[in-house]
Amino acid sequence: MAYILETGRRTPLISDVPAGEADMPARTGVPLVSRSPGAHAYRASRGPGMQALIWLLPFLVMAALVGADLSAGPSIGFLPLLSLGPALAAVSRSPAQTALIGLLAVVLCVLLAGYDGLQGSPREIIDLVTICGVTAVGVIASVGRLRRERELADVRAVAEVAQRVLLHPLPRAAGQVQMAVRYISASASARIGGDLYAVVMAAGNVRLIVGDVQGKGLTAVQTAATVLGAFREAAYDAADLALIAARIELSLERQAAGEKFVTAILAQLPVGGSEVEILSCGHPPPLLLRGGAVRFIDPPEAGLPLGLRHLATGSREPRIVSLEPGDRMLFYTDGVSEARDKSGEFYPLDGCGALLDGQDLGTGLDRLRDDVTRYVGHALRDDAAMLLISSGPPSPRVAGSQLPEILAAGKAPAASQGPR
């Protein structure tokens, strides 16, 4: 549950989303956890055409062998090749189905042996033993495959639940600030990623963090949990973003997850949405979108990732960018900016203005997600988080040449400046 800090007490901002609510993915951007059996999860990863082909393949192969044997006669020994039927069935079918297809192969072998005049011969016996042996091995392989599928489905379910626990649902709006988030889980394996995001309201300000933990796996999740916990605790009472970053780094120093660092963007803006203060900690810069024009918001100086403050030579300097009604700002992780096509070219993120402009925030992120996937040509191999905020109702379109003037107004606040 998210909270508003008001007159020294926390009051609920939004309620937890009820389990099973149909629009949960649209509201949170976090995929629902599938509770289907492992075999169903395995089949769901393939297209309908591929599923049909795999289903028919054992029968097609055995039909082709029957036709070849009828044409060539006993001079060419096609009968042992009928064992390909149960062997192929073991790839996608249950043990019982594999055994039935093996039985069909045995029946076909007996019939063809009779047709070829080989009934009762040593050759027929050898062919039948071959088919039965391959069928037995196929049944055993099918049992092992189903067990592994169920284990993988369980691991993926646990990974998604862990992400759901870490990445809380976000409100759709806070004052005049609208927001939407999408999280794309890597499909290559069941590894849990270290991408993170959170939004907290405190004293009339919206404070947020978007980050990416070095590495993957359970240690990355532990680090992400440390960062999110420290942020959610510090965001309510810290005087500024630099202090929030310092408290996160202090928490990172105390954790026992090994040498880990986190690239992150911290930002805050009043609920009126007049300006946004951005503190970069070695993270890809956010994008400002105004009337279709897109510009990266680079920090005053390159900041070190969280967890590496012992290497810093000075304090972190935030940047303030003025916002107008209708402006949008995209925060993201490198799963988006470093997505590559088949030739190795990075996704042109600075060309996403048309995808995000003039759309509902969630719809715009859906279009961006789909465009990144099309550009890559396959499911992303790295987790990706996208958080889009808007400063209020849309304003008239502004020419792209005016955008540098908007950014020129940005300035670094004094270190002692508190939340506005």
Image (cartoon, rainbow, N blue to C red):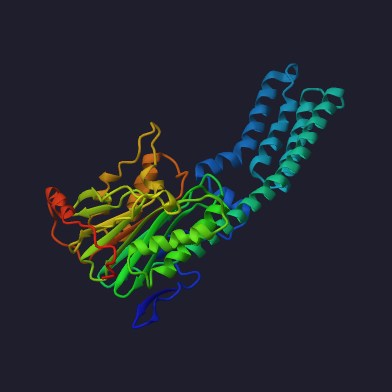
State the residue at coordinates (77%, 26%). Answer: 115
| Quarter of the figure with residue 62 | top right
Please indicate whether residue 291 sits to the left or right of residue 304 in the image: left
Q: Residue furthest top?
A: 75
Please indicate whether residue 92 sits to the left or right of residue 189 in the image: right
Please state, as top left, top right, bottom left or bottom right, where the N terminus lies in the image: bottom left
| Quarter of the figure with residue 414 | bottom left
- Give residue 311's position: percent from left, percent from top: 42, 48
Please indicate whether residue 160 sits to the left or right of residue 275 in the image: right
Residue 360 shows up from this direction:
no
| Quarter of the figure with residue 394 | bottom left
Q: Is residue 55 above or below residue 355?
A: above
- Give residue 385's position: percent from left, percent from top: 40, 54
Residue 217 shows up from this direction:
yes
Q: Which residue occupies the foreground of this view, 26 or 319?
A: 319
Please state, as top left, top right, bottom left or bottom right, where the C terminus lies in the image: bottom left
Q: Residue furthest front?
A: 313
Q: Which residue occupies the foreground of this view, 340 or 111?
A: 340
- Give residue 256's position: percent from left, percent from top: 57, 57
* Count of number-bearing discs: 0
Q: Is residue 353 above or below residue 67?
A: below
- Give residue 132's position: percent from left, percent from top: 80, 35
Q: Is residue 11 above or below residue 404?
A: below
State the residue at coordinates (73%, 35%). Answer: 105
